[in-house]
RNA sequence: GGUCUGGUAGCUCAGUUGGUUAGAGUACAUGCCUGUCACGCAUGGAGUCGCGGGUUCGAGCCCCGUCCGGACCGCCA
């Protein structure tokens, strides 16, 4: 028998029992006459004592042990004279009477402990050792717990989990596809799904009514700490529902997860339209943990002879409370440089300090009188001691820039606490998105998203401004400024779908070639339906108060999409290429 | 495609204006130590300063190229 208990089990009640434990050796503290050993497994750490006075041979044997050896120990549970209150098992220890080395270990390249000395790259290369660390294991247990609770909740609501294929068909819309060559169909390729979108809609046509799947999705785009080439979605679709039904169901799911996993009761989620989000926060995923919303100044700031503002499409700013005194010229210059970095791209920054004595100081005081600044302060709702930061330029760009500045100021003021959870539904997304490069419209969500009923008559007006203004029954769940998921009501009417394809510039032939199977299905009684998908990895990370999703994925890939543990992707043999009717054109010389 | 940043002992890092034999902590090894839990003390082995080229009497340090990480912009319906 390898063990009678695991390493997190023993308590004062076990004192006197003979037990056997197996696990990995953690820290070893050798005192010359007695040796303290921490034995670790998934469940915890138990201290084992080898006393030279009681058993000299066993003590000598214990001195051979090194870190990460796998051992089996048998001994008597004893109450400790020196207890360790930081450990669940800290009241007891095992006085060993038998020790067996089950497997030796080389000295690991980094220390297996919570505050490891290993850097990211090293930890990735030896991911199986990194995953031995309690702190990483905790993340994966958390993920598992969420997955189980998702299944509990949705199955109780009569959802069925259906698996959909991973080898599907490439479509030019959306993200870049990962493709897989087909040996049996030379020259042809499967694509890995960016999401099970079309399949879940087909399941609705089939009458499954409520579908979900915790499913891998694949997108061949550049990566970030919160984006992996393969990631997991909680994917859902429902029939005979309105947007309201879907929002309520998944608000319920989110609340359930917070309750079960974090013991947090979330209040009803506020809702905001896409337009309002952009106008007040400069983002379609606003972080509403703090205010500092935008105030527009066009009517107050233009036409007073300040050329920068006069030339701008939009003059807009935020009011940073109680920071006028804390921001010296030097700090403001530094902040100006910050917004001028290419990643933000602002041309400059105008600041106005509403001093405690009621006076104003500003980088634009040459062009404006105190009475002007007073009207601005009124617009901002500013009080004495506040700092107003103003950007100007093209509307879309300047909103985005100010949105970044707002987040930065919120961060600097400590207003973005990771465990202060503020969910938000953003609704009424535009139907279309203008692509500057391609000089055409694309579906903002996807090509099956239903326009709002009121907007359907305007769809084929051909007028760019009207097309930009078209709204869809599309929505996102945002949590602390992170897009957790999104969805839409789908078009179930063949005629409307054709109209939408026309809007997106598809010829009937192209639409037929790409989505014929779905359009065909829609001719056999498609129910009204809609759905949503949550990014599962992101949900895990945000609920854990961190930004990076990598520590919630057992075997993640790095920034370049490489798995540096197994060294993938890799070159393949010529014979494999031949079999797949492939020829590699350019190989990077090594 | 672009911006920024890093690569020095197994690991985490320091290394001044270019100047003698490249350091610290930790890990590892050996010895001592009976109550530690980041044990303590002593000893000592450990280096292709990412790689290639250049400048120089002399390069870890400066220049050019290149490889490999990290953060970000573009991109991600």
Image (cartoon, coloured by chain):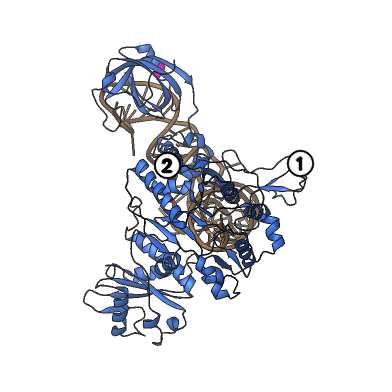
Secondary structure of the residue carrying tag 1 is loop
The hue of chain B in the figure is brown
- Residue A429 picture location, percent across and down: 49, 63
Q: Is residue A77 left or right of residue A251?
A: left
Secondary structure of the residue carrying tag 2 is helix
Regarding residue A166, the answer to whether it shows in the image is yes
Regarding residue A546, the answer to whether it shows in the image is no
- Which secondary structure class fits the magenta region best? loop
| Residue that label 2 marks | A153
The hue of chain A in the figure is blue
Against B52, residue A330 (above or below) is below
- Identity of the residue drawn at 39% across and 44% down: A257
Most distant residue in the left direction = A357
Rendered-image quadrant of the N terminus of chain A = top left
Q: Quadrant of the rendered structure where residue A309 is?
A: bottom left
* Contact check, label 2 and label 1, Cβ < 8 Å: no
- Identity of the residue drawn at 73% across and 44% down: A182
């Amino acid at each position: 028998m390898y063990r009678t208990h695991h390493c997190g089990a023993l308590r004062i009640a076990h004192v006197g029992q003979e037990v056997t434990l197996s696990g990995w050796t953690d820290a070893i503290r050798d005192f010359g006459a007695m040796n303290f050993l921490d034995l670790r497994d998934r469940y915890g750490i138990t201290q084992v004592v080898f006393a030279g006075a009681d058993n000299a041979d066993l003590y000598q044997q214990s001195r051979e042990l090194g870190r990460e050896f796998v051992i089996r120990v048998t001994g008597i549970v004893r109450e400790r004279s020196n207890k360790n209150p930081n450990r669940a098992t800290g009241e007891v220890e095992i006085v060993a009477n038998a020790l067996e080395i089950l497997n030796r270990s080389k000295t690991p390249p980094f220390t297996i402990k919570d505050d490891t000395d290993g850097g990211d790259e090293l930890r990735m290369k030896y991911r199986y050792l990194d995953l031995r660390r309690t702190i990483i294991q905790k993340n994966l247990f958390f993920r598992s717990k969420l997955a189980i609770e998702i299944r509990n909740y949705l199955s109780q609501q009569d959802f069925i989990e259906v698996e959909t294929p991973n080898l599907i068909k490439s479509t030019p819309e959306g993200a870049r596809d990962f493709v897989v060559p087909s040996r049996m169909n030379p020259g042809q390729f499967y694509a890995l799904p960016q999401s099970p979108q079309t399949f879940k809609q087909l399941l609705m046509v089939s009458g499954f009514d409520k579908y979900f799947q915790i499913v891998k999705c694949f997108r061949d785009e550049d990566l970030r700490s919160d984006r992996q080439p393969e990631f997991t979605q909680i994917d859902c679709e429902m029939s005979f529902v309105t947007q309201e039904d879907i929002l309520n169901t998944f608000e319920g799911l989110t609340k359930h997860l917070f309750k079960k996993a974090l013991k947090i009761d979330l209040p009803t989620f506020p809702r905001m339209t896409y337009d309002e989000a952009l106008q007040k926060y400069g983002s379609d995923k606003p972080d509403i943990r703090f205010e500092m919303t935008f105030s527009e100044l066009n009517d107050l700031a233009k036409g007073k002879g300040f050329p920068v503002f006069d030339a701008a499409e939009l003059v807009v700013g935020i009011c940073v409370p109680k920071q006028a005194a804390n921001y010296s010229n030097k700090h403001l210059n530094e902040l100006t440089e910050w917004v001028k970095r290419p990643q933000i791209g602002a041309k400059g920054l105008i600041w106005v300090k509403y001093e405690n004595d009621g006076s104003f100081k500003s980088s634009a005081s040459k062009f404006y009188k105190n009475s002007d600044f007073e009207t601005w302060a009124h617009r901002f709702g500013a009080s004495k001691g506040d700092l107003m930061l103003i950007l100007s330029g093209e509307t879309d760009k300047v909103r985005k820039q100010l949105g970044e500045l707002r987040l930065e100021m919120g961060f600097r003021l400590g207003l973005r606490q990771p465990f202060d959870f503020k969910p938000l539904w953003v609704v009424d997304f535009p139907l279309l998105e203008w692509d500057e490069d391609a000089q055409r419209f694309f579906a903002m969500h996807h090509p099956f998203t239903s326009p709002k009923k009121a907007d359907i008559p305007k769809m084929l007006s051909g007028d760019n401004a009207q097309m930009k203004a078209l709204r869809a029954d599309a929505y996102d769940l945002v949590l602390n400024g992170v897009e957790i998921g999104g969805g839409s009501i789908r078009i179930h009417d063949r005629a409307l779908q054709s109209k939408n394809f026309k809007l997106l510039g598809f010829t009937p032939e192209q639409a037929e070639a790409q989505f014929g199977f779905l359009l065909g299905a829609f001719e056999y009684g498609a129910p009204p339906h809609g759905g949503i998908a949550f990014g599962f990895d992101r949900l895990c990370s945000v609920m854990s108060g961190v930004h990076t999703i990598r520590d919630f994925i057992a075997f993640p890939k790095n920034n370049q999409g490489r798995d540096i543990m197994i060294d993938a992707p890799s070159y393949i043999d010529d014979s494999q290429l031949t079999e797949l009717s492939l020829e590699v054109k350019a190989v990077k010389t090594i």
